[in-house]
Image (cartoon, helix red, strand yellow):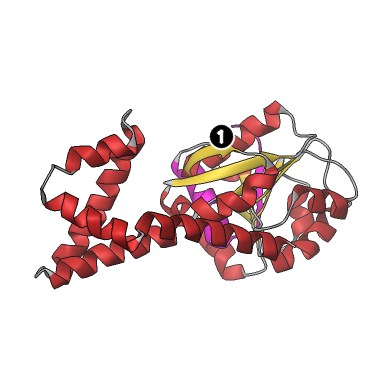
Amino acid sequence: MSQKIGFIGTGRMGTSLIMGILRKKLTSPQNIWACDKLQDRLSFLARSGVKTSTQIRQMIREVDVIFIAVKPQDIDVVLENLKNEVRPSQLIISIVAGVTTSYIIKKLGRKIPLIRVMPNTPVLIGEGISAISPAEETGPDKIKIAREILNTVGEVIEVTEELQDAVTGLSGSGPAYIYTVIKGLIQGGIKAGLSHKIASKLAMQTTLGAAKIAKESEKSLDELIAEVASPGGTTIRGLKVLEEGGLKNCLAQAVIQATQRARELRK
């Protein structure tokens, strides 16, 4: 990739994206800029060859793609710095939770290629998924650039912007739900007589393996369940407990409630 990429904000998400780009060798470290008000974060990235700055406007003049990766309460300050500096040829990619493309365009006072993104925390290890929602004036060439960058930390899907709250409720919050399921499996293993170490290893690898099979198999989830659950066997008894406890409904409600909360926060 020949484009120069700038990051405003180098917290966990911003840094993970930068490290993903470097790990996949999408572009040279010299084509990446990092901007943050915290010097210790910049010092860490500078050791990887990334150019750094504490001044947003200095960085904006040098790059083709601008990632906004700050907390929602800091977005207005960032947009004020961008307002008279950003060029129509540049692409803005925002991963700021709950901030709409229409809000960003309004604050900038002009239309510009813009994409809103909802990544999830597994991007930290290159196994995330990012949902992108391009603004109306964003062409396919700009969307392709965004996909190439985000593919360095996982998979990418495109959704209409009104679905971003649902994405937040499912994939954004989802890792915490899965961690809770893993905790339950570990707890059960310990109560059944296993050590914490062995129960943890079994639960985590089982979760990882099952997710990989579900992702790669052409069979439905019901078919995969049936393959494990022999009639009258151990799995059937365990599944009965989950059904009586309403596990599937609880997980569905968790997604729905998280989606609702995302809508409330956005408003």
* Quadrant of image for the C terminus: bottom right
Q: Which residue is mark 1?
A: 148
- SS category of the residue bearing label 1: helix
Of residue 241 and residue 163, the one placed in the foreground of this image is 241
The stretch of residues the image draws in magenta is 1-23
Residue 256: x, y in percent?
55, 57
Q: Residue at x 33, y 61 (%)?
A: 181
> Tag count in the figure?
1
- The three-letter amino acid code for the residue at tag 1 is Glu
* Quadrant of image for the N terminus: top right
Q: Residue at x 56, y 69 (%)?
A: 40
Q: Residue at x 84, y 60 (%)?
A: 80
Q: Residue at x 31, y 40 (%)?
A: 212
Residue 219: x, y in percent?
31, 30
Of residue 46 and residue 85, the one placed in the foreground of this image is 85
Task: Tell me where residue 113 sits by quadrant.
Answer: top right
Q: Is residue 209 left or right of residue 71?
A: left
| Rendered position, 226 above or below 41 | above
Of residue 224 and residue 154, the one placed in the foreground of this image is 224
Task: Tell me where residue 188 sits by quadrant.
Answer: bottom left
| Rendered position, 223 above or below 199 | above
Residue 22: x, y in percent?
49, 44
Q: Is residue 60 left or right of residue 50?
A: right
**Residue 221 shows up from this direction:** yes
Characterize the local packing of mark 1: few (<14), some (14-19) or many (20 or more) Cα atoms within 10 angstroms.
Answer: some
Residue 182: x, y in percent?
30, 61
Q: Is 20 contained in the magenta span? A: yes
Q: Is 123 contained in the magenta span? A: no
Task: Tell me where residue 2 sits by quadrant.
Answer: top right
**Residue 27 shows up from this direction:** no
